[in-house]
Amino acid sequence: MRKVFVLNGPNLNLLGTREPEIYGSQTLDDIANDLHQQAESLGLEIDLRQSSHEGHLIDWLHEAAATDAQAVVLNAGGFTHTSVALRDAVAAIVTPVIEVHLSNPQARESFRRRSLISGVCVGSISGFGAGSYRLALDAAARL
């Protein structure tokens, strides 16, 4: 079965309680449950992980490449705008990475409008709440 890593960065463990007016009321567990059901219907297996530590995300990107994952869906959270190391890890692997955001960074504070990782991803999906993950998983299935 084809595997897709779904990697989540800092503060995404607080979904459902953290600024629900921006990020919605679904928890990361809610999103995971939805994605597992969707993945099954697409013939995919997902490996969903979250860490607020940059190095974990980098190690997991390397692991995705080493295990020949179909794709990575990456919500890097705040690291999107600050982490050259995370950008370099995405660029270093051949596994396609799809950038995901719950909110639309272009409609938010100016510092959020610059993504260091989008230029090395195969695509970016943002602004659709938890639906952004579902759209990204559909895209991953078609790669």
Image (spheres, helix red, strand yellow):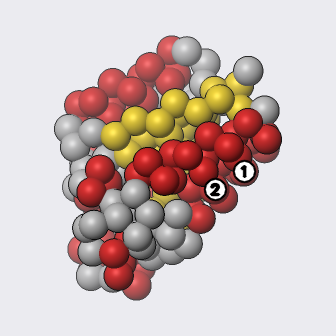
Residue, x 35% and y 64% (percent of image)? 16
Classify the position of the C terminus by image quarter.
Answer: top right
Q: Position of residue 132 (x, y in %)?
A: 57, 63
Classify the position of the N terminus by image quarter.
Answer: top right
Q: Position of residue 98 (x, y in %)?
A: 56, 49
Determine whether the residue tagged by mark 2 lies in a helix, strand or loop: helix
Residues at badges 1 and 2 in contact (C-beta under 8 Å)?
yes
| Residue 77 occupies quadrant | bottom left
- 120 left or right of 139? left
Q: Is residue 113 visible?
A: no
Question: Which dot marks residue 134?
Answer: 2
Q: Is residue 6 above or below residue 93?
A: below
Q: Is residue 111 above or below residue 70?
A: below
Judging depth in this view, the residue of 14 and 91 nearest the camera is: 14
Determine whether the residue tagged by mark 1 lies in a helix, strand or loop: helix
- The amino acid on which the numbered mark 1 sits, given as a three-letter code, is Asp
Neighbour tally class for label 1: few under 14, some 14-19, many 20 plus, Cα within 10 Å: some
Judging depth in this view, the residue of 88 and 8 nearest the camera is: 8
Q: Is residue 10 above or below residue 126?
A: above
